[in-house]
Amino acid sequence: MDVSLQQFKAEFFKALAHPMRIRILEVLCEGERNVNELQSIVGSEGSAVSQQLSVLRAKNLVNTVKEGTTVVYSLRDPLIKDLLAVARQIFDNHLVESISLLEGIRKEK
């Protein structure tokens, strides 16, 4: 595999390596939002949301459009929605395995 592709993937996953950035992307999967809407939905103060949006912008994961004095954010690539859905499926699979393991342990007692 090409080293530049590996580097891109590593940087891409680093950009996803924060719970608030994941939550922001999940919200943007539902449609465009401005900072105030994101703050309200994410339930965090403005500076924290703005900081994470800055990382997402720097890694080209979100687009911005200025509408008057408001900046509106959207997903740069709609495939991010699919990626997050697959991550959820993987999480669910691990959860099912953990529950099965726990049930097995309980039966042994």
Image: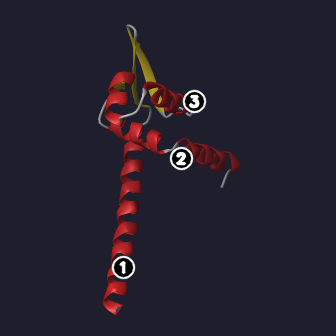
Q: CA distance from mark 2 to mark 1?
A: 28 Å
Q: CA distance from mark 3 to mark 1?
A: 42 Å
Does the residue at mark 2 contact the one at mark 3 (Cβ under 8 Å)? no
Does the residue at mark 3 contact the one at mark 1 (Cβ under 8 Å)? no
Which of the two discs, 2 and 1, labels the residue nearer the N terminus? Answer: 2
**Above/below status of 86 relative to 75:** below
Residue at image mark 2: 17
Amino acid type indicated by mark 2: Ala
Secondary element at tag 3: helix
Q: Percent from the top left, x then y, of residue 70?
A: 38, 14
Question: Is 1 left or right of 105, judged from the image as shown?
Answer: right
Residue at image mark 3: 58
Amino acid type indicated by mark 3: Ala
Residue at image mark 1: 102
Which of the two discs, 2 and 3, labels the residue nearer the N terminus? Answer: 2
In which image quadrant can residue 41 be found? Answer: top left
Along the line of sight, the residue nearer the viewer: 58 or 77 = 58
Q: Residue furthest bottom?
A: 108
Does the residue at mark 2 contact the one at mark 1 (Cβ under 8 Å)? no
Q: Percent from the top left, x then y, of residue 42?
A: 36, 36
Question: Is 9 left or right of 26, judged from the image as shown?
Answer: right
Along the line of sight, the residue nearer the viewer: 20 or 108 = 108
Q: Nearer the viewer, mark 2 or mark 1?
A: 1
In which image quadrant can residue 74 be found? Answer: top left
Q: Percent from the top left, x then y, of residue 97?
A: 38, 74
Q: Quadrant of the N terminus?
A: bottom right
Colour logic = secondary structure
Q: Which residue is rendered at x = 46% and y = 45% of the image?
A: 19
Q: Residues within 10 Å of mark 3 (few under 14, many from 20)?
A: few
Is residue 78 visible in this depiction of the protein? no
Q: CA distance from mark 2 to mark 3?
A: 14 Å
Q: Residue furthest front?
A: 109
